[in-house]
Image (tube, rainbow, N blue to C red):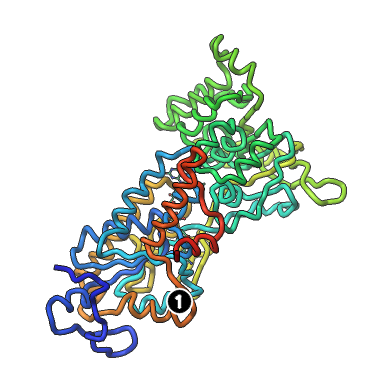
Amino acid sequence: ACVPRTAVNVTQGVALKPGLFTCGNTVADSFSICSPKVCIVGSGPAGFYTAQHLIKARQDVEVDIYERLPVPFGLVRFGVAPDHPEVKNVINTFTLTARNSRCSFYGNVNVGKDVSIEELQQAYHAVVLSYGAEGNRRMGVPGEDLAGVYSAKDFVGWYNGLPSCQELSPDLNCETAVILGQGNVALDVARILLAPTDILKKTDITQPALEALVQSQVRRVLIVGRRGPMQVACTIKEFREMVNLPDTRPEMMADDFEGVKEALKDLPRPRKRLTELMMKTALEIPSEKEQERQSKASRVWAFRFLRSPIEILANPDNSRTVGIRLAVNRLEGSGDGARAVPTGEVEDVTCGLLISSIGYKSLPIDPSVPFDSHKAIVPNNMGRVQHTAGLYCSGWLKTGPTGVIATTMNNSFDTARSVVEDMESGTVDVSAARPGSQSISGLLEERGVKPVTFSNWEKIDSLEMSRGEASGKPREKLLTVEEMLQVARK
Ligand code: FAD
């Protein structure tokens, strides 16, 4: 049987050199001391799915998850839209993994700053990097830093309670908002800007965001893409949600769909169904009931195709945005590979709020880890970091920031399989014991870093849920790291 980790006395292992131990004498002690120890950096879906697979695949492996924030679950907590609670059910599975006696969570540990990857490599047999994609791609056009211009990453972080985004307080005192990008994140942002606040107030959206949205003057949201309707990156579920969003009506442009009908038959099925729905929305005369609903709508949304940003326009004193200059494009080629080529024509659109939703990107966190800055990923082969035995990656850091939680799950399982294979083949030597968290905890203590355990997080979780209950929401999130730590340590 496995010895509970807290009962293991690490001094029974004989230190050979820092980070390397031989096994103790008794079977029980040696089991835990000698068990393969894996450390995972990041507690989003990638971290938890990697841990889940490792624990299931090997009965002796012990997994420690280090997370920068005091709270777990990454983008499931801070990315997934508040009005998509069903998506967040994966948290139940992650919680089961975290409560497994062979898994430990160490929140409030910023890897790369509080502890280096090299130190983790010395303490563990294998290190899996699953720290996601926390940067955002910039538009690279003049005016990008004007007031009123935000990245979707920050805007989403703001309404979802990410502590570093709480200062954002976006100014919603304008009629038109432009969102650049036509993926699901762009549609999440459009929905949150336009949804009746009576719907939002029953979600886990933060109270400051809800209050700002109640006061919001935004009545029109344009969702702009550089290519055509057959290249949009959103999926049908998210588009249908826009079509059905109460108190809104679509204003698609019929001309955008010229020639699309003829191309439909060659499209793969999901793309075909989405394009058909877009065409229906743009071209068909709605039923009487729908017409009545639309005539009463106070808010409008629309897709604008074949437009790329050239410049963000500023007011006379250059203090904030008043619009955007767009290049009008034409398509070269067809299908997913079609390229947007500027026609030379430009168009100015007036707006007081501009949100760029053109993608997230991973960032390097430690100079010792190979990083492909062009692709913004850690270069890897099936999750094995190139030229670095015992170092792995999973999730968005491995693949780039695309795909849903299910995609992340599959690629994380693949990485866990690579770890297990390497342990079995001896590529990763697990015959000599490693101290795991025992030595890292010492280092963190020396550095004044106090990790948050999973049961500490559960205190935050229950407080948030009880605060939410009082106002008819699933939870009221704590918004600062300080408050989280205070509650965790009570
Ligand atoms: P993340 O979820 O980002 O997790 C990374 C974790 O690493 C974070 O907890 C972070 O705090 C931590 N970390 C970062 N740096 C460090 C460090 N130095 N040390 C320690 N820890 C660190 N998918 C769906 O299926 N349905 C949806 O509705 C959906 N909505 C989405 C909405 C948005 C706005 C976004 C951006 C994505 C959405 N996704 C959705 C996709 C889904 O969130 C991703 O597939 C998934 O979260 C990627 O997992 P990950 O673990 O690689 O990254």
Give the percent coordinates (x, y) of residue 308: 66, 42
Q: Is residue 349 above or below residue 160?
A: above
Where, by quadrant of the figure, is residue 258 drawn? Answer: top right
Q: Please give the residue where the numbered disc 1 appears in the rendered image.
A: 116
Residue 280 visible, this angle: yes
Front position in the image: 120 or 226: 120
Badge 1 density bin: few <14, some 14–19, many ≥20, Cα 10 Å: some
Front position in the image: 253 or 343: 253
Q: Is residue 388 above or below residue 136?
A: below
> Could you tell me which residue is drawn at 48 percent across and 69 percent down?
110
Where, by quadrant of the figure, is residue 65 drawn? Answer: bottom left
Image check: 470 left or right of 386? right
> Could you tell me which residue is drawn at 53 percent across and 60 percent down?
483
Disc 1: residue Cβ within 8 A of ligand 1's nearest atom = no
Give the percent coordinates (x, y) of residue 442: 39, 81
Count of numbered circles on the image: 1
Where, by quadrant of the figure, is residue 87 drawn? Answer: top left
Give the percent coordinates (x, y) of residue 192: 58, 38
Mark 1 residue type: Ser
Helix, strand or loop status at disc 1: loop
Q: From this viewpoint, which residue is outermost toward the right?
A: 316
Image check: 15 left or right of 468? left
Q: In which quarter of the image is the C terminus?
A: bottom left
> Could you tell me which residue is drawn at 34 percent across and 51 percent down?
409
Q: From this viewpoint, which residue is outermost toward the top?
A: 288
Give the percent coordinates (x, y) of residue 201: 55, 36
Residue 347 visible, this angle: no
Image check: 276 left or right of 23? right
Q: Quadrant of the N terminus?
A: bottom left
Image check: 21 left or right of 155? left
